Image (cartoon, helix red, strand yellow):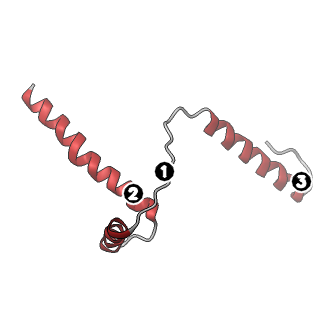
Amino acid sequence: MPKKGNIYSILIQTIFFIRTTRFEILANTKTPRISIRLELNGDMAQKFEELKDEWGMLNNTEIVRRMIKETYDTYITNQRSRNNKSS
């Protein structure tokens, strides 16, 4: 944590402390991380833009996240609930 000193010194020390602490937390995280770079052309780009307009979203990343979540909910969650009912 910051030591005593002038306000500028305290501010710099605090920023450094927050940044290094955040890095340590991120470095110790064991969650999976996937980076996707996707280029859509023609019909697929048009369909994507229509979804974007329909859902009222501006950010392409949020569209992809929503598609993944809805697909997961439709296929994986429903499949698991069917399997639990048959058990």
Q: Label 3's element?
A: helix
Q: Nearer the viewer, mark 3 or mark 2?
A: 2
Identity of the residue drawn at 77% across and 51% down: 15
Task: Report, in whole angstroms, how far the alpha carbon at label 1 lies from the one at label 3.
Answer: 40 Å
Identity of the residue drawn at 16% across and 37% down: 81
In the orientation shown, which residue stands out farthest toward the right?
5
Residue 49 image position (x, y, % from top left):
36, 71
Residue carrying label 3: 9
Q: Label 1's element?
A: loop
Specify few, some or many for label 3: CA neighbours under 10 Å numbering under 14, 14-19, or 20 or more.
few
Compared with residue 80, is residue 73 higher up or lower down, i.e. above or below? below
Q: In which quarter of the image is residue 75?
A: top left
Residue carrying label 1: 36
61 sits to left or right of 45: right
Residue carrying label 2: 64
Q: Which of marks 1 and 3 is nearer the N terminus?
A: 3
Identity of the residue drawn at 35% across and 57% down: 66
Question: In the rendered structure, which amino acid carries the disc numbered 1?
Answer: Ile
Q: In which quarter of the image is residue 50?
A: bottom left
